[in-house]
Amino acid sequence: MIPDRVDDALLGWLNKTRLQKVVVLHINHANEIDQAVIDACQRLKQAGATLLNQSVLLRNVNDSAGILAALSERLFEAGILPYYLHVLDPVQALPILMCPTVKLARW
């Protein structure tokens, strides 16, 4: 999430629309959620938005139950609902980020 993108123009549009407001964020690690992100999320929620998060499971970034639990707890603290955990499709360009299937099966 880039907190600076939650500006007056976006908030004005959200406040005017009659549509249901759902914002899906892309946060992969609890350390990405700093005070600027929390403040931006509070502004979105004040504009009536429901905040969801989708994460990508990344090797050596968030590939343990403890790290994912910490991410979920931090998301809840920021008013964001953990929504989706995506496992990368096998592609040749990203093997360094992919979690081994054996590790996923142990969960």
Image: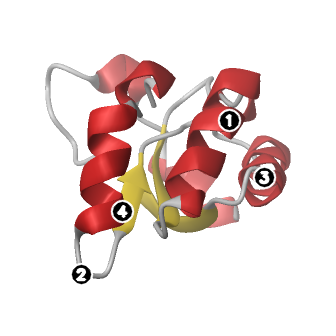
Q: Are the residues at dot 2 and dot 4 in contact (C-beta closer than 8 Å)?
A: no
Q: Secondary structure at mark 4?
A: helix
- Residue type of the residue flagged with mark 4: Asn
**Mark 4 — residue?**
15
- Which color scheme did the rendering employ for the protein? secondary structure
Please tell me which residue is depicted at 37% across the width and 69% down the height of the picture: 22
- Report the front residue among 63 and 36: 36
Q: Is residue 46 above or below residue 89?
A: below
* Lower sequence index among marks 2 and 3: 2
Please tell me which residue is depicted at 31% across the width and 59% down the height of the picture: 14
Q: Is residue 22 left or right of residue 36?
A: left
Mark 1, Cα crowd under 10 Å, few <14 / some 14-19 / many 20+, is some
Q: Secondary structure at mark 2?
A: loop
- Report the front residue among 78 and 12: 12
- Report the front residue among 101 and 93: 93
| Label 3 – label 1 distance at C-alpha | 27 Å
Q: Is residue 73 left or right of residue 34?
A: right
Q: Are the residues at dot 2 and dot 3 in contact (C-beta closer than 8 Å)?
A: no
**Mark 2 — residue?**
18
**Mark 1 — residue?**
39
Please tell me which residue is depicted at 41% across the width and 34% down the height of the picture: 6
**Discs 1/4, front:** 4
**Mark 3 — residue?**
65
Where in the figure is residue 27, as x and y percent of width and height?
52, 39
- Residue type of the residue flagged with mark 2: Arg
- Residue type of the residue flagged with mark 3: Ala
- Residue 93's disc is none
Furthest residue toward left? 92
| Label 1 – label 4 distance at C-alpha | 17 Å
| Label 3 – label 4 distance at C-alpha | 38 Å
Q: Are the residues at dot 3 and dot 4 in contact (C-beta closer than 8 Å)?
A: no
Please tell me which residue is depicted at 74% across the width and 50% down the height of the picture: 78
